[in-house]
Image (spheres, coloured by chain):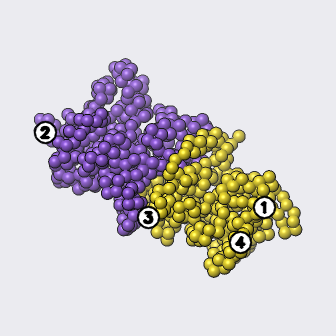
Chain colours: A purple, B yellow
Amino acid sequence: MPPGRSRRTNSVGSEFGLIRLLQAQAARPDRQVYRGIGDDAAILKTSANEWTLITTDLLAEGVHFDPATSSYEHIGYRAAIANLSDIAAMGGTPRFMLVAIAIPPTCSTKQIQQLYRGMMRAATPYRVRLVGGDTSASKQGLFLSITLTGTVDPRRALLRSGARVGDRVYVTGTLGDSHAGLGLLTTPRRPTQASLRPAQTRFLLARHHRPSARIAEGRWLLTHGLASAAIDLSDGLTGDLRHICEASGVGAEIFPEALPISPACRAYALARGIDAQQIALQGGEDYELLFTVPRRKQQQFDRLAANTDFCMTCIGSITPKRLGLRLRTEAGVTRTLPVTSYEHFLRPS
Amino acid sequence: MPPGRSRRTNSVGSEFGLIRLLQAQAARPDRQVYRGIGDDAAILKTSANEWTLITTDLLAEGVHFDPATSSYEHIGYRAAIANLSDIAAMGGTPRFMLVAIAIPPTCSTKQIQQLYRGMMRAATPYRVRLVGGDTSASKQGLFLSITLTGTVDPRRALLRSGARVGDRVYVTGTLGDSHAGLGLLTTPRRPTQASLRPAQTRFLLARHHRPSARIAEGRWLLTHGLASAAIDLSDGLTGDLRHICEASGVGAEIFPEALPISPACRAYALARGIDAQQIALQGGEDYELLFTVPRRKQQQFDRLAANTDFCMTCIGSITPKRLGLRLRTEAGVTRTLPVTSYEHFLRPS
């Protein structure tokens, strides 16, 4: 996990007094605000037929991205996916994008063009329209802020807060690939790559540079009313599952053997002498969806899922809050999932 | 004018190839986009009764603000006003705010609280609701990105592009006060302050630290259908008038003797040996509205304006494009207004 990475969701770091202050302010009743701070995106009751989602991110050079390991096009691509993924996690359809950048003197116009190209390559397949922005100078380091709006059916958005005891926990895709790809980039000279096939290396790098936003999966979950809660995986499975549990007032147990791990990620873990499950549990920026399905809907879910080409895996279940976050192996052994937090930037003392 | 200040509008620096690329991309027809990149805010046709405005800014330490001369509360206040002013310039009503910050290790939680307090103090009088955001680390320097939405009557938003030859040019408030206030802060030890009365010093500092967003004036202009074009003064009168002229395909002449200059600003100019008109023409960040009124509506404008407590001054008129931007003195002497540009950050060569 990249050091210093921030929470990149709509919730803003619960350990700070300032956040409580803000949430208190934002929590003042407002007839148009269905959800404010605290989920992947705000939900605004903008019209009777369609509600508006809105989310914003600020990405900093040296914290969220490093031009030494990513091209500007990839930096732009991943930045757009991070926001698209927030809309996906609500079951929404992305719509309009605004991009503000602060450009250091060391950046060339060509690099900024590449950055925009990456953003547009990620966003255009979803018919997202760039409608505004801001450009300015930065004395040091590139900063990139994306705001994305979307639409969602009234009252149906997928929230973090809907998970109930007994619900099954699912993820889309495979876990840890982005982290493994980053590992290949940051420490490429170890004997690791020799033990990965070229196609596996390419796969992991592609998952890091060009992750997917699971818009179609989110829409499908919403349309069929199958999910009780959802979030996108930016902080890593453990961290984001914790957000769902906190928002829903529940605990969860994860079946480590069930975690979907790609052969490439397994090969990477083997070569590096790391536990692949650990990467799957903690590796960030996969931008897969983590969601819960009520037990009574599981049959319906399985039946409908069989008719899609989505990759979705049941990895655990929701438990009472007092049990916390746990791993439960096939042998029935349980152990507490370690707390991992990336909210450590502000005077970590 | 603070060195390195960027354009802080929705238009993104016309001199770069990348901007043309983006505008071409953004210009693809979209039934919901009434105005995209190129005005103070984007205008989205979100419902039949009400359209949505959206604008975003990214402010960088050392470029847009300096904690050495502004408290964090003032930095937050001004950042919010900069966005509120963009909504004011469209005749809109501000509604929802998202705040993303990248916080350097040198910043304390208390300072960030002050920053938010300033933003909320500026925004709350307009019933703007904070609905989301993002917090992250910055390796160096504080970065602050605000996204603000608003609403506007369909088809009635004030645009930059509506000025026509013969229209009168107006501004709200007085010009140059923010620049003078900044001057007092950045070079306070010159004999200047001695020649300003304490109340004048307080006034100029207040105009710099806590400028106004002319929301009521913008709404009034829109409601009565009085303005043909509008923009807010962030770059300074000359720069922002140029934006109106470029968007409208016209020229303009300014009557220097008519420029509304406060006694405090005049006293400042005198003490510093600077031409007060020059400060009024080029000083940035006043966040007053600059707007044009068709000549046939001028009588109506004057009659209605007499019933308000708004301060609005006629400072010039719109001319054919070929005449460019000029000053016309009472004696009838004309001279070209010098081009001033703050778009000089990206490899100024």
Which picture quadrant has residue A276?
top left
Which picture quadrant has residue B197?
bottom right
Answer with mark 1 or mark 3, whichever residue precedes in sequence: 3
Picture coordinates of residue B183, whole percent (x, y)? 68, 63
Q: Amino acid at mark 2?
A: Val
Q: Amino acid at mark 1?
A: Glu
Q: Which mark lies nearer to you, 1 or 3?
A: 1
Do callouts 4 and 3 mark residues in contact (Cβ within 8 Å)? no
Q: Which mark lies nearer to you, 4 or 3?
A: 4
Q: CA distance from mark 2 to mark 4?
A: 82 Å
Q: Amino acid at mark 4?
A: Gln
Q: Which residue is mark 1?
A: B253
Q: CA distance from mark 1 to mark 2?
A: 81 Å
- Dot 3, how many residues are within 10 Å of its Cα: few (below 14), some (14-19), or many (20+)? many
Q: Which mark lies nearer to you, 1 or 2?
A: 1
Q: Which residue is mark 2?
A: A333
Answer with mark 4 or mark 1, whichever residue precedes in sequence: 1
Q: Amino acid at mark 3?
A: Arg
Q: Which mark is residue B298?
A: 4
